[in-house]
């Protein structure tokens, strides 16, 4: 448990950007700590003598470049579920506690995955294209009930997704670190068997955290093992996929479609062929951004700050070696 200064309030550095509003409960945070609000350019100076870092700008990778200034730091809270952007070697090996936003995005992302499946099966994207062209095309669409879904990533978001998809009649299996049976997924395949596990899936959903083991896990071999009619959904991290291999699979008909909320480089470069592929459906890393999500993130941090200030155990402590909250 990180130690709390006895004679002075703790110093909380809040890394943010001009585009992102400060937490709505900033005054409640200030009641517990001295707060320094900074952008990436001022982070090094702000960290001098600081105890806590709130990564309100949760995509920032600025901490690594100023790590030498963070000698007093005890705790870092990432206002995001994924923490891959800050698990650089020096931080990973340090004694600094890391917490994340586990639980905030579970239901919104599960709903987004369901929406992506339905939009694909019911050809909603194609219908919009036809509408723009003033084309009335009466046709059959795909039934969704009973289809097979493979969810890669069995943490909190994956589990909520499995429950929601099963509730509407989809057949769900999972992929995790080890093979096992599970009440929500039924069968969980080991990630080392991913190429075999995808062979029967109508929809493959990527929700795994980005780690050394998962980077590029959907590679050319996995893509080749998928059914040509399969639909790939990525709401995890873009780098889970070998993007050039996916583009080739889409171009040659080895993969039917991809719904991508995340890509390797964000924002997606203008030069990417993904922009203009009819079978690719893009969204701007927003699958978890249901109304009120910023307030939920702020409340979550405040609760952990209250517990930390009282020397109580904090919620959502990340295992820095694995990159996620154990048992979640």
Image (cartoon, rainbow, N blue to C red):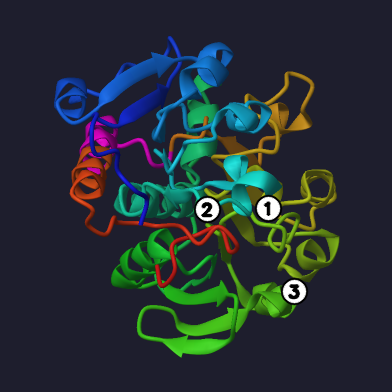
Q: Given this view, does label 2 or label 3 mark the residue nearer the observer?
A: 2
Please tell me which residue is depicted at 44% across the width and 62% down the height of the picture: 325
Helix, strand or loop at label 2? It is loop
Q: Position of residue 144 (x, y in %)?
A: 43, 64
Q: Position of residue 218 (x, y in %)?
A: 73, 60
User: Which residue is the site of mark 1?
Assistant: 240
Give the position of the C terminus as an image quadrant.
bottom left
Say if mark 1 contacts mark 3, CB within 8 Å.
no
Please tell me which residue is depicted at 29% across the width and 56% down the height of the picture: 315
Horizontally, residue 111 falls left or right of residue 24, namely right
Please tell me which residue is depicted at 50% across the width and 45% down the height of the picture: 123
Helix, strand or loop at label 1? It is helix
Front residue of 15/133: it is 15
Front residue of 275/278: it is 275
Q: Is residue 142 above or below residue 241?
A: below
Q: Position of residue 327 (x, y in %)?
A: 41, 72
Marks 1 and 2, the one that precedes in the sequence:
2
Q: Is residue 88 visible?
A: no
* Real-space Cα separation, disc 2 to disc 3, in angstroms: 37 Å
Q: Which mark is residue 195?
A: 3
Q: Position of residue 226 (x, y in %)?
A: 72, 68
Residue 189: which quarter of the image?
bottom right
291 within the magenta span: yes
- What range is drawn magenta here? 287-300
Front residue of 293/167: it is 293
Q: Is residue 306 visible?
A: yes
Q: Given this view, does label 1 or label 3 mark the residue nearer the observer?
A: 1
Mark 2 surroundings: few (<14), some (14-19) or many (≥20) residues within 10 A:
few
Marks 1 and 3, the one that precedes in the sequence:
3
Front residue of 254/68: it is 68
Q: Which mark is residue 95?
A: 2
Helix, strand or loop at label 3? It is helix
């Amino acid at each position: 448990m990180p130690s709390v200064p006895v004679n002075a309030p703790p110093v909380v550095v809040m890394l943010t950007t001009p585009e992102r509003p400060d937490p709505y409960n900033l005054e409640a945070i200030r009641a517990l700590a001295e707060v320094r609000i900074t952008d990436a350019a001022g982070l090094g100076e702000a960290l001098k003598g600081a105890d806590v870092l709130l990564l309100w700008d949760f995509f920032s990778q600025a901490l690594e470049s100023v790590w030498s200034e963070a000698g007093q730091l005890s705790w870092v809270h990432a206002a995001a579920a994924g923490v891959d952007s800050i698990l650089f070697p020096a931080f990973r090996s340090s004694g600094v506690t890391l917490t994340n936003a586990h639980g905030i995005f579970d239901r919104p992302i599960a709903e987004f995955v369901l929406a992506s499946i339905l939009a694909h099966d019911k050809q909603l994207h194609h219908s919009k294209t036809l509408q723009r062209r003033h084309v009335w095309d009466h046709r059959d669409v795909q039934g969704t009930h009973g289809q097979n879904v493979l969810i890669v990533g069995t943490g909190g978001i994956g589990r909520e997704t499995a429950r929601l998809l099963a509730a509407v009649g989809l057949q769900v299996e999972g992929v995790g670190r080890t093979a096992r049976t599970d009440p929500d997924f039924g069968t969980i395949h080991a990630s080392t068997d991913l190429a075999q596990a995808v062979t029967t899936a109508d929809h493959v959903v990527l929700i795994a955290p980005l780690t050394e083991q998962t980077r590029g896990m959907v590679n050319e071999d996995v893509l080749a093992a998928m059914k040509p009619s399969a639909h790939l959904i990525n709401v995890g991290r873009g780098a889970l996929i070998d993007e050039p291999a996916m583009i080739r699979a889409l171009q040659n008909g080895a993969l039917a479609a991809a719904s991508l909320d995340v890509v390797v480089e964000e924002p997606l470069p203008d030069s990417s062929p993904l922009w203009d592929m009819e079978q690719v459906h893009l969204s701007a890393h927003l699958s978890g951004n249901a109304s009120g999500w910023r307030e939920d993130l702020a409340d979550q941090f405040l609760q952990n700050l209250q517990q930390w200030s009282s020397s109580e155990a904090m919620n959502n402590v990340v295992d820095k070696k694995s990159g996620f909250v154990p048992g979640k």
